[in-house]
Amino acid sequence: MVGLARPADAALFGALVQKIRSLGLDRDDELDALLGIVRGRRHAKRGEGIVGRSNTFPRRLTVLLAGTACLYNRREDGSRQIYTFQYPGDFCDLHSYVLPEPDEGLTVGALTDCSTAIIRSSELEATIERYPKLGRVLWCVSMLEAGIFRERLLMGRRPALERVAHLLCEQLARREALGTCSGLVPLTQIDLADAAGLSVVHINRVFHDLRKLGLLSETGRAIEVVDRKALRQVARFDGRYLDTPKLLSQWQLHIDEAPN
Amino acid sequence: MVGLARPADAALFGALVQKIRSLGLDRDDELDALLGIVRGRRHAKRGEGIVGRSNTFPRRLTVLLAGTACLYNRREDGSRQIYTFQYPGDFCDLHSYVLPEPDEGLTVGALTDCSTAIIRSSELEATIERYPKLGRVLWCVSMLEAGIFRERLLMGRRPALERVAHLLCEQLARREALGTCSGLVPLTQIDLADAAGLSVVHINRVFHDLRKLGLLSETGRAIEVVDRKALRQVARFDGRYLDTPKLLSQWQLHIDEAPN
DNA sequence: CGTGCTGTTGAGGACGATCAATGACGGTGG
DNA sequence: CCACCGTCATTGATCGTCCTCAACAGCACG
């Protein structure tokens, strides 16, 4: 078993393992091969950047092991557009991994204290060559991320209440997929404003309403969802776009099938 | 030479060849291998759907050979959110190619009469296995598309005039990359409204202003940009996110380099 | 020569931004 | 232990952008 062989890793890599497994890369040798090349552990304090100059060679892939981060861009006026939040097991800079000239402005920042690790591209490439399925899984992961972007665009015209509710539902769903079942969302209103494309002031008014509706906790600064079902209704949330499709093996099954 | 060997294909596959070449897949044998598996030619009239049920097997990839299409989703209220426009050489459904369970609502529609072709996944997989670089190129193309989504999100908070100007700049830039140098944008105001997330009425007012500013042609219904430079200034357009990065070969060069 | 789609214009209203000020909390250092 | 500070949260007032509704004009199509 993967986790048992290296007990120290079990807690640290737990999310990564779970994520990769859910994507269909579930053979132990494949998993071990991937975990085996996860090397330099790093830490980033809240507010710091995570990925570093992404167009420097040799290239690498960064994995978030603990904490919450976000992928964002700064606007000319200094404001921040957050594209997506990142949780343990997520690849921080997969979006630029295959691009020869990654977007300079695109940044990954730590929203809480974070712990990361890196995978050197030379080793990753070698591993992919040996386990081609790994390459497909990574491609697949990056397409799921693109799906998140599209979903955000789709929400763009909804009223603020629904948009925020939807954003919260997404965070809950993604954290549930990692085994985190509490209703706590480890973000600030500021983060949500920058992700939803709303002013902080207005986010706060939306929060006021969400609390009055009994969807969010009334106590403390932490954001805590207390009625998920109702929240999902308000947001009309359909989490299928997040679906870590249980079986990538479908792939291998159907590829060499039939005509036209 | 690729094009010369099959003169009939030269015009039809021109855009596809150009696009693939610009991505670094420039060896003739690789190109020929790809073109060799482009099979069933189809046509779609303006308003029709292009991709068909995307989760049916055997899977395939659709290439747009001529015309203009768009990737969109319908909202509950029937309105349409256009994520991106597609031009000759674009892969219509690459976004769902690697996903086991593609989003059902995600649709590709013909905005003008279109001509398409398909590549069967079985053949594509075999070709990729023989020319792994092709796999990387396709992954790369799908990441560029994700970059377009992010750019759209980034524009989300800009005033309507800039947003529309930016959208127009993007279309011009993408068409220039295909060798189309006219300022004509083959879209309707309705299409732009659905892409920009604005009401048709307001798009029209923005057009009124853009024309008054001397950026768009005053005559006829067609959308024609007459002052690109000024439009780019208004939009503060930086097309780097579209960059078909000239050399994917950088990749092979740097992968097996160095330490850490 | 209608019929339908696209484009155009006006009027009123709503949602969310901005500006401004204050409150609450946690951490740090005296 | 308390004073201080910075960050985040909260609330009020005003304003602007953009939406909606509605009507009509132009053009292309059969």
Image (spheres, coloured by chain):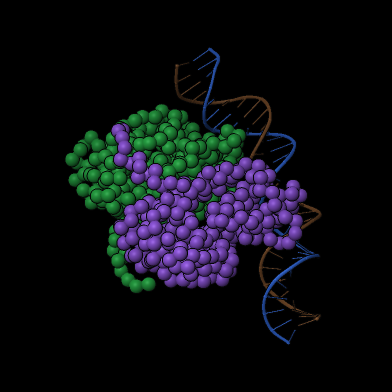
Chain colours: A purple, B green, C blue, D brown
Closer to us: C30 or A202: C30
Above or below, B133 against B69 in this view is: below
Instruction: Name the residue: 61% across, 49% down.
Output: A169
Q: Is residue A66 left or right of residue B116?
A: right
Above or below, B213 against A104 in this view is: above
Above or below, B224 against D3 in this view is: above
Locate residue C23, reporting x and y percent: 80, 65
Instruction: Name the residue: 41% across, 69% down.
Output: A39
Residue A256 visible somewhere in the drawing? yes
Locate residue C17, reporting x and y percent: 66, 53
Locate residue B35, reporting x and y percent: 26, 41
Closer to us: B122 or B205: B122
Locate residue A3, reporting x and y percent: 46, 63
Q: Is residue A190 left or right of residue A13?
A: right
- Tell me the quadrant of the picture where the C terminus of chain A can be found: top left
Closer to us: B3 or A95: A95
